[in-house]
Every structure is written in C-alpha cells, then in structure tokens.
Image (cartoon, coloured by chain):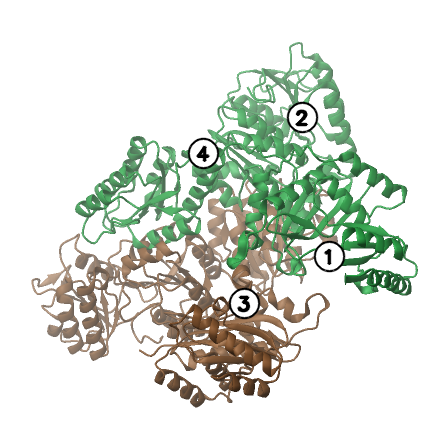
Chain colours: A green, B brown
Amino acid sequence: MGVLSNFFSPKSVAIVGASNSPGKIGHAIVKNVMESGYTGKILPVNPKEQEIMGLQAFPGIKDISEEVEMAVISVPAARVLNVAKECGKAGVKNLVVITAGFKEVGKEGLDMEKQLLATCREYGMHMLGPNCLGMMDTHMQLNTSFAKVFPIKGNIAFFSQSGAMMVAILDWSRSVGLGFSKVVSLGNKADLSEIDFIEEAAEDPYTRVILCYIEDVSDGKRFLEVVGNATRKKPVIILKSGTSQAGAQAASSHTGALAGSDLAYETAFRQCGVIRAKNMTELFDLAAAFSKCSLPAGDKVAIITNSGGPGIIATDNVESNGLRMARFQKETLEVLRSGLPPESGIYNPVDVLGDAKTDRYSFALEKVCADPNTDVVMLLLCHAATTEPIETGRALIEMKETYPDKTFFASYMGGEGLKEGATLLAENGVPCYTFPEPAISSVNHMVKYRRYIDSPPDESGLDYQDVDKKAVKAIFYDVLKDNRLVLLGSEAAEVARAYGIPAAPVALATTPDEAVEEAEKIGYPVVLKVASPKILHKTDVGGVKVGLDSPEAVRKGFLEIMESVHRFMPQAVVYGVEVNKMMPRGTELIIGMTKDIQFGPMIACGLGGIYVNLLKDVAFRLARGLTRKEIESMLAETKSYSLLRGYRGSEPQDINAVVDAVGRVARLALDFPEITELDVNPVFVYPSGLSALDVKITISIS
Amino acid sequence: MGVLSNFFSPKSVAIVGASNSPGKIGHAIVKNVMESGYTGKILPVNPKEQEIMGLQAFPGIKDISEEVEMAVISVPAARVLNVAKECGKAGVKNLVVITAGFKEVGKEGLDMEKQLLATCREYGMHMLGPNCLGMMDTHMQLNTSFAKVFPIKGNIAFFSQSGAMMVAILDWSRSVGLGFSKVVSLGNKADLSEIDFIEEAAEDPYTRVILCYIEDVSDGKRFLEVVGNATRKKPVIILKSGTSQAGAQAASSHTGALAGSDLAYETAFRQCGVIRAKNMTELFDLAAAFSKCSLPAGDKVAIITNSGGPGIIATDNVESNGLRMARFQKETLEVLRSGLPPESGIYNPVDVLGDAKTDRYSFALEKVCADPNTDVVMLLLCHAATTEPIETGRALIEMKETYPDKTFFASYMGGEGLKEGATLLAENGVPCYTFPEPAISSVNHMVKYRRYIDSPPDESGLDYQDVDKKAVKAIFYDVLKDNRLVLLGSEAAEVARAYGIPAAPVALATTPDEAVEEAEKIGYPVVLKVASPKILHKTDVGGVKVGLDSPEAVRKGFLEIMESVHRFMPQAVVYGVEVNKMMPRGTELIIGMTKDIQFGPMIACGLGGIYVNLLKDVAFRLARGLTRKEIESMLAETKSYSLLRGYRGSEPQDINAVVDAVGRVARLALDFPEITELDVNPVFVYPSGLSALDVKITISIS
C-alpha cells in the first residue's frame, strides 16, 4: 500500500451523477467501473433514479448507509462544491472530480476550484481533478474513467496532464503491446498532482516504470524532493511540453498552467534523476525498454546482424550514444570463425550474412552471450527469403533465460511477415523495434539509469557551519533603512564575506581623505568606483579610475570622479567612492543566480569577463538540493573547466575554492529568498584560492 | 530518358546463369523479370538448358542473334570476367553483376573487380555491382533482382549500398504504403554508383524524391558537382552510415568502403543541398513527406487539434524547428470564435475539443485554410469516443483540393481504429504520422528545401584574376631544392601574398646586421623568431623576442636567440632569424585547411588565439565549389561573427576582407593540391583590412 492510502483500492466507489442514459458521462463511468472487474461496492448516486444499470441508486451521498471510500463526481460544475461538502461530511476519503469548468475557464472557475480545494482540506479528503478523465488500475481492476479503452495489464504507471492524449495513447498502446499498471488523468491538479502519484507508484509493487506527460510542475520544491527519492527506486520518464514560448502560451490557455522556463525544468529533471523524453515517440520507446527488460550490467554492446548496413548504422549509434562495442575474447573470435561461413563478419558487429537461418543466429548468440565482455546483445534481423523471424526470436528468448545477467534487444526490419516474431519477443521481455536506432538510444538511457542508481547517494550537501546569517540580516536592514533595494558594492562584498565567499577588499569613502585612508589600509594599487546604486554603467560617466598607486593619485581620482559624475548625472544620489583593491589577474569566472518561479534559485557558473555573453560558456544548477559533487560536475560541463585544470601547460587553478564559492552562493540564495539578483563577476581564480571582485546583490521585500 | 541511356528500359534482358531450379538465384531472377510485367525480350543463358521457365535458353551471349541491351550475370565469380567479355563483344550496353566474391573478400577479389571494370570500359558498357541484388523499376516494369518483394509503384527512387537492408525496407514499405519508382542495390559500386543514379533520377519523370543509403562516396569531386545539380531539381535525402570510428571499421570490413571523416560528409552534403537523414526512421519519415505532398509556400504552421496536450507538443516543435506559428487575421479569429464552442482554443493551435466530430474540424479547417497567414495545416486527432477518423480525413483531403497552395499534414494518435483513416490520408497526398513530432520535423526540412531551390544559383565563385601561380611555384621549387617540405615563415608569407592574402611583413635575416637592416625596412617595433622548420615550439627554446624597438635591441635579440636555440637544440638546422613586424592587435581569427580523402581541401575559419582549441568556435566548408556567399554563411555560424560585426558597441571589423582572405586560401588550396597543411593563425582583423600574422605551409611531392 502506497502513500496515498487506498486511492487505487477503495472498498467502495460512489458515482455522483450516475446515469441510465447511454452517451452521458455518468453512464460511461458506472459502466466502466462495473466492467473493470472491480470487486468493491459500486454505489450510483442520482436523486431521480431508483436503479442504475441494475444497481441500487441513492438520492445523495448522505443516504448511503455504508462507508464510501471514493466518490467519482460528474455533476455540473455549479453543483460540485455542494457534493464535495456532502462527501466530506459522510467521511469519503478520496474524490475524483471529472467535471470541467474550473480554473481552465477563467477567474470564476478558479474561485470555485479554490473553494473546492478548501473543502477537501477541511474534511481531509484527497481529490483528483477537477477537469479530468479519471483513473484506472489494471491490478486493482478499477476504472473510474469515462474512456472507451482500458489498457492491457502491465507494469507501466502513466500520469498524464492531457486527458484526450491519454486515451489516444491507451488506444495506441494496445496495438503495440504496452501494458500499464495505473493510468491517471491529472486534470487541473488542484490537489493531487504527478508528484503524489509518482510517490505512490514508487512504492507500488505492480509498477516498474513511471511515465508522465506534464505541462507544468506546481510545487517545484516538493517535486525535487519526492521525485528525487522515487528515481532511486524506479525509472521516472517524463515528457514535459510547453518548452517553447508559443507552446507555453498554448499550455497556459489550455489548463491554466504557468510553464516555467525550460532551462529550470531541464536542470531540475537532471538533478533529481528524471529521464526526460524528447518527444512522444521516445517516451514510449523508453517505456517499452524499461518495462520489458532488466537494466544492463554495463555499456558493452554486441550486435548480431544478417545485413551489413544496419550493423554499421547500429555501430554508429553505439558510439554516438557514448556506449561501447563489446570486444570479444580471442576464444570467442576463434569459435565464431570456425563455426560461421568464411564471408561472415566475426568482429563485433557479427554479420551472420543475408541467408542466415535460426541455426546460424543461435550459434552466434551462444558464443557472444558466453563472452564476459558482452553486457547487451542486440539482434538485428532484415527480412530476407531465408529468415525465420519466429524461430530466431525463440532462440533469442532462450538465450535471455540462459543468461539472466545480460540484456537483450532486437530490431526486426521488414513488413507484416515479421509481426508475429516481433510480438513474441516483446511478450517475452525483449523489446523489439523496427529500426535499430531507438533500441540503441534506449540502451543508453538504461545504462545511464543503472549508473545513477548504483552510485551511492550524494551526501556532500551545502551545510556550511561558518555562515553568519545575522551579519547578512544586519546589512539588509541598513539597506532597507536607507530606502534602497540595491546593495552598494562594499555592502555586497560584506554579505559575501559573511558567507565565506572571499570578496576582494573594498571600502566606501565619502571624502578624498577617507579614500586615501582606505587605500593605505587595503594597499596600493587601488581602483576607485563611484558608489551610487542608480548608476549602472559607471565607466560611461567617468565613474571609474584604475591603477592608482599613490595617495596623490587617489585624492585626484576621487575628485575627478565626483566632478565627472555630477556633470553627467547631476540628479544621481552619490554615496561616495568605493576603494577597491586591484587584484592580480586570475582565471576569470562568473558566478550568478537567477530565480525560477517553480524551482527557486538557479546558480550559474562559467567563463567570466567581457565574452561571457558572447560565448555563453555557463552551466546551471538549482540551488535546492545542490551538492559539492554536483557543483563539480557542473564545472566540468563548461569549457572553462579546461582553463581551471591548467590549459596548455599553464598552472592548475584552485578548483576546490570555486566549488566552495559556488556552494556558498547557493547557500546564501537559499537562506535569503529575498535576494532577487546576485552576480559575482568577475571571480579571479588563482592556483591557490580565489577572489570575488565585484559582487552585485538586489533584494526585494514584499 | 535520363543520362544512363536505357539502363532502366532495355529492349531486351539476358540472364546469364539462368536456372530451372527453384532456390537458385538464376531462377529467381528469371522469375522476377517475367513477373514484373516486363514487355521486352527475356533471354535466359545457360549452356545446359534448352528452355528455362518456358523461354528459349541460349548456350552463351554470342549465340543470341538479336541485340542484347542488358545482361544480368549470376554465374560464379571466377567466370564473370569471361561472360563480361562475351557481352562486350556482343555489344551489350549494360551489365548487372549479381555475383559476389570481389572487392569485399580481399586482394584477389579486388584484382578481379579491376579487370572486370577494365573490360566494361574497353567495350563501353555500364555495370551495376558486382555483389549486388539488382535493380527494379516499377514504371518500366522491370525487376532484375532476386528479391522476393517488389515495391508498390510510386515516386521515390531508392539507391542502397546495403542489399539486405533494401529488401527489408521494401518489405516494410508495403505495410506503410510508401511507393517507389526505381530501387537499385548498389553493391560494390565498381562502375555505376549513387552519383550516376542520382543524376539519372533527377531527370526521371516518374521520380519525385531521391533516397539513398550509402556507406561512402567514391568520387567526392563528381559527387559535389552532380548531386549539387540534382538537388536543384529534386530533393535528395541521404542516410550515410559509418560516421563513427567503430562504424567506419565495420563499413570497411563489409564492403571495403573507405569512409571519410564525417565532418567532410556533413559539409559536403550541406554544400550541395543534400537533406541528411539522422537515422532510418527519419529517412522514411522524410521520404513520406516529400513523396506525398507539395512543398510549403512558407514556414507558417496552423495546428488544429482535438486535444490540448498534443497541440502544445506540436507548438513546441514548430518553435524548436525554427518554424513559425501562423498568426490568424482578426476576421479568422472572429469567425472561429462565433462558430466553435466557447471552451475551444481559437488562437493557433485551434483546439476543437475532445468531443469534436468532423463538422467542427471541417469548420475550423475551412477558416484556417482561408487565412492568408497559413502556409501549412497540421491536423492532430486523438482517438476519442466521438472522433470520426475517416470522415475527418475526407474533409482534410477536400481542403487540400480547394487550397492547392497550402500543404497538409496529419497526426492520428491512437490504435487500429485509426488505420483506415490514416491510410486514406496517405493515399491522397496527406502524410499521416502517429505522433506530431516527425510531421513537424518534416515540414521544417521541406521549408528549408523550398528556400534552397527558390534561392538564385550562387555565382559568387572564387575566380580571382590577380593570383600569381608562377610565384608560388617558384617558392615551392626553392623549398624542394633545399630538401624541405615545410616552408619558412617568410616563404609562406610570400606564397600568401602571391594569392592576395595580406600577410604581415616578415623577412629572413642570417646575421645581426641583416636583422637590423630588415627591421629598419619593416619599421619598429619588431618580433624576432628563430627560422628552423624543425623547431615547432619556438618559445620553449627561447626562440622568440617580442617588442624590440631599436637597432640595439634587435642585434641583442638576434644573438640571444641563436645562443639559446643552440643550447637547447644543438642539432637543429637554423636558417637564421625571422624579423616580423609587430602588428597592432585586431580581432583574432584563424583560417586553416585540412584535407579530406574524398572531398579534398576543407577550409576552417573562426576564433583565433590561444583559446582556439579550447572553444572550438570554428566553421568548415569544402574549398571545392565554395562561393563568397557560402563563406559569409560560414562566418555567420561562428560566435566570433558577433565580434566581427562589432560586439557590445565596439567598432565593426572588415568582414569583406575576411571573406576575401578565406576565399583566397581556398583558391590556393585548390590550385595547389600538393599543399598538405596550411594554417594562418592568428589573423588580425581591423575595421579596415586585416593582417595574416603567421602563415604555415607544408607541401608534399609524391
């Protein structure tokens, strides 16, 4: 039993809005519940009927004497709230609200939906929908939907934010032999969402693969946590649409979903181990693979083919997917050489030639499976005069049973004549595709997933003990008191230092004398910059002086800056001049933060300096759940990483210091959600340590 | 009639090796020729038979009194050469050599193949094969293959370097309703290759789309020329395998093909307008699209759907493919609003809702087609209770006839119940896919192809009148006389200048006095570099002095370099010291050349300086057929292009000078194939003009 208690296995189901008229939704639901083989109580509710499809009908929920565990509601939208209240009073545990006309139709609907949710919360009920098609469970044998199709029983749990698409997919899945454990139409996700169902399915003994089609995620924080746990137990494959500007608009008008930026989703999915399908075809190609066969032990693929061309194509694909071609042992090659015709290819791919019957495939299969260097066996079969698709399929299935540690795939290329063989394979745990490419791509995803679950949980979190929250609060307080939201450079540097980020020395001076005093403290040479939150492009107004190496130069610089700034921007409030230590040049990085509406702060790190926008050599991670290991992998994604490691003979830079600084920036962003903008650019990295030269922080108090 | 004269329409076909025994290849061929509906003379040749399958058999080719236009040969390899000679003597025009055992089995086979080719050349015969499955023409009704399947008549010409795959594909194509005009198994391509068949098919009135599976190209130069012409007439879609290291090995062992680097193929295909399919699925998705419907007039796509989810997915795909969503006129929106249910989406994608029958689809179709902003109409249909796949298909076909200028696609999502509707669409010129993504991707390729053929032929070739070939030859002559292959910097700069590439001043000095003399001529400051072809890393041995601005500094620099080099590399031959003008810094580019075995010189241009290998911001083009326009598009592919155009307010650089320099480097590489290596790095580009600072040239005389 999963976390949603008995959502999928209620002892009794009431259908409110049940009907005797074929064509009505309330009729289709009763019919589906009855025909699904459901063994609990079916309780139709309709005040105008005595009996519905042979079952006793009740005027209302309150008139049912026994306990109702689930109510499926398909009355008009205006009446749903009252029905929900009745259900609450009667102690119903779960609602499935089929009725449409809520959030998706505008303000009024949204208000109704909020009231509906409040009612559910009040009575401790869970709710699926509104505006959904219902749910199906092939193992509990319950179908509360009004869809015409019911899936084949299987091990795929499928949660879809699009109802019509879900039905089309179920229809299509029957023709390709994909089986499902649970199917849920998510609707408006007012209460229960994909997050809850993923959590549930991760514990469900009948589910092996979790498949989702979603248009948005409503609670990014919980998604990361729950799905991050689920993926450690079962593969979670998600097709997320609304990635484009235009698509997000369509999504928004469709279900009222507020689609986040795709970068945030991409990053979130990766960080919590979700396998992201590029398109519908891939979603189901992957579902077939994960559903049917075991995870490969490794990445070494052996190919057996009866035609050179597809063998080469498959080999290309093995390489482009980052997998390896198995290198057979000497003994394997010898025995293949002696047992196959002389024209055969015995090196991987093994080419058993166009006239191969089952015996030759069998022979090659046996030898290749026995080779310890083979993890995955891919059988390619082009339909030719002599091919025996069924017998060869049987031979492959036999090998699968003999070698349970190896993973088997097939590609049967040809027409109707191959269908029976392909189906036989699919039914016996060997995914069979028409062309080799999706098979290899699926192997790749399985190998990666295997590595993911085999890797120990990453505990290198960002729990820095030496951060000084109080100091940061004190600075923010002063900034607010000064009626500002943008921090001065000296303030931002202080915030950074409070979190252990080594900001270069910088101090505010309001007079030439103060400037000299600070410069003496900091050490020459120094850089002077006008301190004024309103002035964004300081150089343009003569607000910057670099390389000042004496008290005279500092004094002169101070006065020149003030004069120039007052001339260019007489109206700007000027706080003085910042005295910055001129740091030795290092490898130039940028560390920055942007905020995603669903997933919170997202940290960027990469090549800094003037080319940052041109070269866009920057990697992103969500701050939430970030670890030191993940920061390392983030850095390794950038080309700048080669610079850090010591490019072309130059000295390696302090990568640990970078990891630490990125982690502390993330910690700061998480601890202070009021920080709306945060940029450290440039960061100079040295062979030992680093220096944050320019820290920019903006806060927002709402 | 195409360029291959009557290859596909011979008046008579002799089958040498014809047989009465079922199971023999010579039997299958006679049977196929007879059953294909061929109306010419069928002439079986077999010395042991009087009659084969009811036809008179001849002992040899020479015994046939009438003219033989084509001979299909399936005798054992050892006898093929003699049969070919007989054919030559008898005046046969075309041979189809089915027999295997030639190049693909090793040295001996290769020799036989060479002799066979020589014989064909001697008698002016064309040859398909050897080691092939034969060819089929559905319109001429001729099948000289021994394959069991014959394709549906259609407009796709398919040329395949893999025989077994070809058969599998034909088998599969019947099940999805793809029709072919010609199908050719290319075999070893000793004489006729895909190039000849593409040239022929481009003229063939029955062919609309040219499809190829190839593992290599044997004549890169001719490929570029012929295929470049063909793509202006018909789309040429190619799946090229052997792209990976391992795949190339497999290709090599399989047909003896020497696969070129994939970059060269990628570049060649783009430059001659070939549409490259990523995989087998895409090859046939594209074939279906180009075969069935007209090219879109533009890139504006309108989507009509009965389910929100797929509508969003399709919209995402429109954007990710670089297409545009059609923006409907006000009138269209108004009429859609008034005619569709209130919950419908009337903005593109138009959502006619899950309960839409044909009438609603029809209404939306009519309005959307009438909108002048629609180029492509994509109908999405999810199988639901009320959908009418056949009737809706008919409505779509009707629209297609009413609006011949618009292009129509469909995606029918669901199971067996949709099959009849989908087939109806496919048969009436509307490509219909299961999922929307391949449909949109196909639209993208069609839009791009349309733009390609609509663009005027690019005449901006590299015919520079001011290049001095003689000067280059003279320099190369001196280098060879000096027993070298690597040019000194001063020599390479002279070669560049002879081709109009503005190389920075550089001169060789053998004494300190000469160095001062040259420096005075060139102007201070100068850079001194040791001149020794053996020393690759000059800085490492103290062989470089920069910023020398007086005669004393030059004299001192000369002596220090000599001393240091003699100490570090006492054995290196030193020619003296090169005096280089120290040029003002400009935007740093690299222009380079590599050679591809099939396609010749390939020119690279992009970001120069020390980060060239780190950032790899370099674009490539083949020198052959390169134009000034193409060079511009090449530059535009690099990120450095933003720098050239004036990045972040900086002055724009002289892009024309860069185009000119790249063109002249390409011209030089084409005119002198003996140049094996050529690198100009860095090139400093200025607001007006540029300067090639370091030219490296290596030649090879074999």
The residue beneath circle 2 is A127
Report in which chain the residue with disc 3 lies.
B
Tell which circle, 1 or 4, labels the residue nearer the N-terminal end.
4
Residue B130, relative to residue B319: is it above or below? below
Regarding mark 1 in the picture, which secondary structure is present there? loop
Amino acid on which the number 1 mark rests in the picture = Met
Q: Residues within 10 Å of mark 3 (few under 14, many from 20)?
A: some
Marks 1 and 4 sit apart, C-alpha to C-alpha, by 60 Å
Report in which chain the residue with disc 2 lies.
A
Marks 1 and 2 sit apart, C-alpha to C-alpha, by 61 Å
Regarding mark 2 in the picture, which secondary structure is present there? strand
The residue beneath circle 3 is B450
Q: Is residue B120 left or right of residue B186?
A: left
CB-based contact (under 8 Å), mark 3 and mark 4: no
Residue A133: tell me if it is visible. Answer: no
Give residue B304's position: percent from left, percent from top: 62, 50
CB-based contact (under 8 Å), mark 3 and mark 2: no
The residue beneath circle 1 is A582
Closest to the camera, between mark 2 and mark 4, is: 4
Closest to the camera, between mark 1 and mark 4, is: 1
Closest to the camera, between mark 1 and mark 2, is: 1
Marks 2 and 4 sit apart, C-alpha to C-alpha, by 29 Å
Which is more toward the observer, A255 or B432? A255
> Residue placed at 33% from the left, 69% from the top?
B218
Closest to the camera, between mark 3 and mark 4, is: 4
Marks 3 and 1 sit apart, C-alpha to C-alpha, by 57 Å
Q: Are marks 3 and 1 on the same chain?
A: no
